[in-house]
Amino acid sequence: MAGIKKYLDKTCVESAYERVRECFNRFDKVAVSFSGGKDSTVVLNIAYDIAKEYNRLPLEVIFFDEEAIHPTTIDYVKRVAANKDFDFKWYCIPVKHRNACSRTQPWWYCWNPEEKDKWIRDLPENAITHLKGFKKGMNVPEAYRLIHKDYAGTIVSLLGIRADESLRRLRVVTQRNVENWITMRGKNEGYRAFPIYDFVTEDVWNITALKKWDYNKTYDVFKMAGVPPSSQRVCPPYGEEPLRGIQVYAKCFPAMWHKMLNRVHGVASAWRYSNTDLYSVGLKDPPNGLSWKRYLSLIMDLYPDDDQIAIKKQVNYLIKYHHSRSKKPIHDSETDLITGCSWKFLCQVVIKGDFKGRTSNNMADKADKIRERKGMSLSKAQKLFGR
C-alpha cells in the first residue's frame, strides 16, 4: 500500500475542499449521498461550505433509510433534514440488503410493505416511499441511479468513501493516476466523487472537532461501550462485515434489539456465533476428517438454488484467477504465494456468502502477508511459481 501513496505539500482537508470546489465548477448539479455516518458527515459539511461560497443553495442531500438503524442516528438525520439550506430527500423504499445471518434467507428488504408487522420503526415524517422505475430486488446503488434519471444537465454525487477502510475501497481509487477520486457511474448516469478518499479515521474526527460540526451521537454510545473506532458502524448489522459487531446492538440499544431479533432470519444465531467458525471466523479443521475441497461442495449445497449459482460463480472466478497466475495447484489449506488462494479460503468465501466479493478481495492481501513473512517479493514468487 505504501508503494502507491504520494505525499503532497498540503493537508487532506485542503485537498478535499479543492475536489469539491472542482465538482461545483464542472457540474450543473452536485448532490451528497448521506448515510448519517461520520464520513458522509464530513463530505456534507465541506459541500455545504462550498455551496454557500458559490451561492448554490439549496444543496441536494440524499438519504436512504435502512430501517434497522439506531435512534441516535435517526435523531441526527432529523437535525440535518431540518436545515432549510438542504433539499433533503429521505427515501424509505424496500431495497435489497444482504442478510449474512442466514444461509436459507440470505437477503432482506427494509421497509418491505409485506412485512410491515416486523418493521423496527414506523415510517418517518416526509418519507419518500415511491421511486419511479424502482423494482423489487434493486439494491441502494441501483435505486440511487433512478433519482436523477430524467435530469437533463450534468450531475455528480459526493460519497464519503475512504481508501483505508478496506482493500475493495482502496482499489476503487487506484484504478487511474489522474482524477482517481471521480468516476462515471455509467452511460448517462452521472458521476461519483470521493473527495475524502485519502482521509484516515483520525482526519475525519479532527476536522469535525475543529469545525465544531454536528455529528451522529451513536459514536459516543459506541465509545462508552468500549467499541474501537475501526468497528464503529452505523449501518444495520446484518451484512457480512458489520455482523461481527452485532452484539453491540444488544448491549447499547436494547429496545431496538428486541425488534431486530424478529426482523430477519438467523439473528439470534448470529448474535451467539457470529465470531466463531460457524460464520467463518477462526476456521479450524473441516468436520469428519473431510478435506477443505470436499467440504466446499457440501456447504455450497446449503444455499437456495439461485444464491448457490451466484456463490459458485464467485468461487469459479477465484479458481480461474488462481490458475491464470500460478503454476501450483490449489492447496487444501496453505495460502498460495502469488494468488492467496486455497480450498480453505474458498470455504471462507462460501460460508460467509460472499455475494459482493468483499471476502474475495482479501485473497491477494493474504498472499502479501505470507510473502512478507517469508521475506519474498512478488516478483520472485512469480519467477518461481508464476505463469
Image (cartoon, helix red, strand yellow):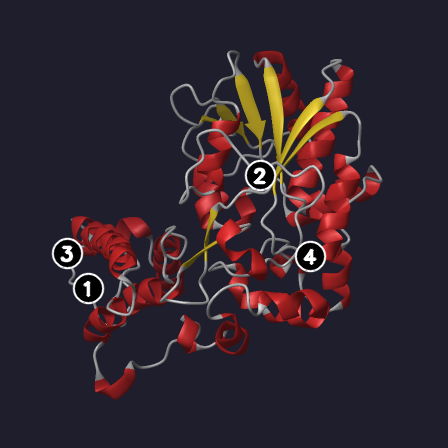
Which residue position is annotated with label 4? 70
Which residue position is annotated with label 1? 330
Q: Secondary structure at mark 1?
A: loop
Which residue position is annotated with label 3? 327
Give the mark, 3 or 2, whose residue is nearer the N terminus: 2
Give the mark, 2 or 1, whose residue is nearer the N terminus: 2
Q: Amino acid at mark 4?
A: His
Which residue position is annotated with label 2? 129
378 or 270: nearer the viewer: 270
Viewer can see residue 226: no
How far apart are labels 3 and 2 at the CA level?
53 Å
Q: Based on the displayed image, in which of its 4 quarters is residue 345 positioned?
A: bottom left
Q: Are marks 4 and 3 in contact (CB under 8 Å)?
A: no
Q: Are marks 1 and 4 in contact (CB under 8 Å)?
A: no
265 or 57: nearer the viewer: 265
Q: Residue, x 41% and y 76% (percent of image)?
A: 278
Q: Amino acid at mark 2?
A: Thr
Q: Left or right of 167: which side holds 348?
A: left
Give the mark, 4 or 2, whose residue is nearer the N terminus: 4
Figure check: 118 above or below 267: above
Q: Secondary structure at mark 4?
A: loop
Q: Foreground mark, 4 or 2? A: 2
Q: Amino acid at mark 1?
A: Ile
